[in-house]
Amino acid sequence: MIELRDVRHAYAGQTVLDVPHYAAGQGEHHLILGLSGSGKTTLLHILAGLLKPTQGTVMVAGQDLMKLAGHALDRFRGQHIGIVFQELHLLPTLTVVDNLLIAQYLAGESQNRAHAMEVLESLDLADKANAYPAELSVGQRQRVAIARAVMNRPQVLLADEPTSALDDVRSQQVLDLLAAQAEQVGATLVIATHDQRIKDHIPNQLVLGDLATA
């Protein structure tokens, strides 16, 4: 489902990421672990097709992302990749359900309100469908972001630091939600984090840099 070969990325001539090989099978759950500045968010953005590496091959859901650009890349991302950003990026002028429906619109899919309500129901958010993000708690907004990420039944679900700012109880809840939603749609789940509390929950791990002092 995911395979990286000889992926390297540099900023201003300085290498910030070097991954000779990495693979994740369909439906597997993986962690990308690393301290701040280790390149884990860079790698997640490469997997999402939001950033092209300096060199290498990036295969996601059977597609070489290096061979896509512009609208074709945006369309592929919308149809096959779900992303939960560290900053949730919910649109404040849209209701909860419309924040989900816009994911279908941007992917070129027909908007299916019934499916959006099913996704919200699965995350105990059906009663918030017509609320606006500012009317929700932090935890509810995070669940909406997860709902939007799985709206198009992605083959790959990516999450950037979803637990680092949470206490132990909420951290476990978010981890469970991500895992459950990924399993529901059969997606490969990849979480980028420096949160050492979740290391024991997901055995498939790629470590970037030195975590000895983490």
Image (cartoon, grey):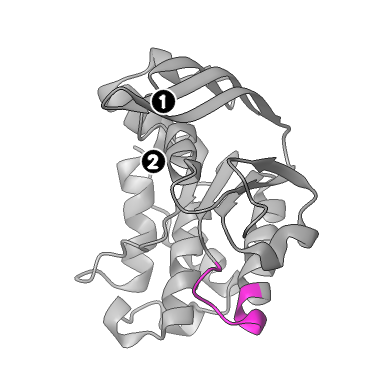
Q: Residue tagged by mark 2?
A: 109
Question: Relative to 156, does residue 10 appear above or below in the rendering?
Answer: above
User: Is residue 132 visible in this depiction of the protein?
Assistant: no
> Can you say which quadrant of the picture contains the C terminus?
bottom right
For residue 175: magenta? no
The residue drawn where x is 36% and y is 72% is 96
Residue range highlighted in magenta: 163-171
Left or right: 194 with respect to 94?
A: right
Question: Relative to 55, does residue 139 appear above or below in the rendering?
Answer: below
Give coordinates of residue 125: x percent, y percent. 50, 78
Left or right: 122 with respect to 131?
A: right
Q: Residue tagged by mark 1?
A: 9
Give coordinates of residue 146: x percent, y percent. 50, 62
Q: Nearer the viewer, residue 129 or 53?
A: 53
User: Counting other residues with Cα less than 10 Å from the Cα at mark 1, is it few (<14), some (14-19), or many (20 or more)?
Assistant: many
The residue drawn where x is 51% and y is 36% is 80
Report the Cα–Cα distance between label 1 and label 2. Answer: 33 Å
The residue drawn where x is 72% and y is 53% is 183
Closer to the chain start, of discs 1 and 2, is 1
Q: Nearer the viewer, residue 41 or 113?
A: 41
User: Counting other residues with Cα less than 10 Å from the Cα at mark 2, is it few (<14), some (14-19), or many (20 or more)?
Assistant: some
